[in-house]
Amino acid sequence: MLSSANIHRWINRAALTSLPDPISGPPLRRGLGLWLTTFYGLGVVVGAGIYVLIGALAGVAGTHAPVSFLIAGIVGVIGPNGAGKTTLLRLLLGLTKPTSGSVQRRAGLRLGYMPQRLQIDASMPISVGRFLQLGIRDVDVPSALARVGAPQLTSARLADLSGGEMQRVLLARAAARRPQLLVLDEPTQGVDLGGQGEVYQLIAQLRDELQCGVLLVSHDLHLVMAATDRVLCVNQHICCHGHPEQVSRDPVYLEMFGDKLAPYSHQHNHHHNISGDVVDDGCSHDHDHALTPPPSSSAPSGSRTSSKSDKDQ
Amino acid sequence: MNDLSFLLHSTFLWYALAAGLLVALVSGPLGCFAVWRRMAYFGDTLAHSALLGVTLGFLLHIQPTLAVGASSCLLALLLVYLQRRQHLSVDTLLGILSHSMLALGIVTVSLLDINVDLLSLLLGDLLAVSPQDLALMALAAAVIAGLLMWLWQKLLAFTLHEELAAVEGVPVEKIRLALMLMLALLIAIAMKVVGVLLITALLIIPAATARRLSSTPEQMAFIASAIGCVSVILGLAASILWNSPAGPSIVLAAGALFLLAHFRRQESV
């Protein structure tokens, strides 16, 4: 299970290693898995392993002020439609070629990919177990499915799965590759509200079990804010990034999502075990927060809540 | 009775049967992919270009099966290329190519005043299969079967989700190309059996029938092959007994089997 102490150990460890300049520095150092030099005029470096490291040229294209920052655990990419979230993801996966620049991956990097959805023709008679075996031949199907809480699906027909079951199966297939970097495209697409929280909990569980970096793209703002360790807000360029709470107070973010988020600001599926500032197992700093502030004001510190606290237990 | 024993001793019947079975065997698994990937129209397009292939073969003095094989392979390559470049949907693209090729074929035939037996081209000429035809067909079928067995897992992964397969290391573009070329080869050899008009039927109907009877992709492929073979035998028998055209009889038999399968309860996998 997720332990916030673990996350903070990762963050602290990551913080000790200074990142190379994403453009001029040596690309493949200290576990950097992917080196992407062009993304709408941005440089983005994503590494995998325990950390996902992202260095970016912040601000609009053209300013070229290199900013490096570290991300541990789950990185959520958010942004409006057409912001380039999916493009970023496809570039990293090698599904799209950059118009300029290049994407370099660490040799032998194991990627796990969970596509947005799987449209299967009803005429294809294939079982879930067989589907998993197509990804990895010697996969242990029952344990792969048990990991995502769906052991009963082994012999179910793939075409008969519900949306939520399908997402679990796709997650199981991605995880069964024992990836160093798990890439998820809208992991809660087509999942009902109750199931969404479960999917995010599963993702956090996988991160701890597989010790992998997770990069996920989602429209689901409040879930992303609640369930990720770092948020990357993009709109053609990287607008802001950081802890979810930090991002949720960023003026750029508020301008982009502020009014839409107001109604959601108190929908959290977690408990407040400590009201006010989060203090837990020896961490000296805040971690991710689910609460998004009203659009006009920055979040009052007294209302911070911990989204992780429920999962710690 | 004498007629029948005479027929059974004549080689053309056995050549016809062998040719039909060969095509049915490989069109089973390929037909499954055509059904799973909704490529029925693709088969039609390749078939429609066959007339052009035949005329070109006539002009260049190439054996018709070879000429059609080459021309539909070229068309398949063109399609793969266009799919990547064009922003038109695949069925629009196929419609354009399919009918342009057919029109081009017909115009060439009439302008060059080539003596092509259009009817046998459209409806097949199974009873006129020569040993040379049969050898070519066996070669093409062997190539298709070999490729299918070699690429089977990758073809399945590719069919389920192209991008997932790509991320997992399947060379997606090569697989797509291989599948199209296999279909092109099949069209070339099936033309002799059921004719240009009915090739898609031989591809789709056995696979669609097998769907109701199978619980794994492999099972579906095998059953589709078997159903194709039964259709060929039934169609040929009808053709001999009632002097009906062989190709359409085979397709009719396949259609009848499809209807029959509907009376069977669907298996829950």
Image (cartoon, coloured by chain):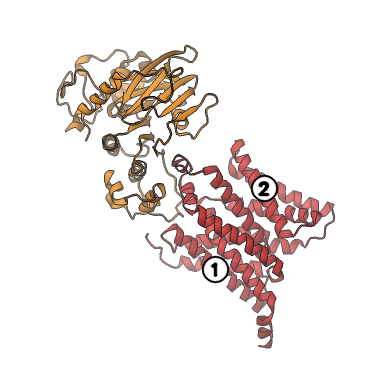
Chain colours: A orange, B red
Q: Residue at x 28, y 52 (%)?
A: A152
Residue A135 percent coordinates (x, y) = 40, 47
**Vertical order, A124 against A228 (above or below):** below
* Residue A243 seen anywhere in this rendered image of the structure: no
Q: Residue at x 14, y 23 (%)?
A: A274
Q: Nearer the viewer, residue A31 or A178?
A: A31
> Could you tell which of marks 2 and 1 lies nearer the N-terminus?
2
Q: Secondary structure at mark 2?
A: helix
Residue B184 percent coordinates (x, y) = 63, 53
Label of residue B75 in the image: 2
> Badge 2, how many Cα within 10 Å: few under 14, some, many 20+?
many
| Quarter in which the C terminus of chain B is drawn | bottom left
> Would residue B221 appear left or right of A192 to someone viewing this image?
right
Q: Nearer the viewer, residue B161 or A252?
A: B161
| Chain for disc number 1 | B
Quarter holding residue B124: bottom right
Instruction: Give the residue type that dot 2 points to.
Output: Leu
- The residue sitting at the bottom extreme is B2
Label of residue B256 in the image: 1
Residue A164 percent coordinates (x, y) = 33, 43
Residue A281 percent coordinates (x, y) = 15, 24
| Chain for disc number 2 | B
Q: Secondary structure at mark 1?
A: helix
Instruction: Give the residue type that dot 1 points to.
Output: Ala
> Badge 1, how many Cα within 10 Å: few under 14, some, many 20+?
some
Q: Nearer the viewer, residue A77 or A293?
A: A77
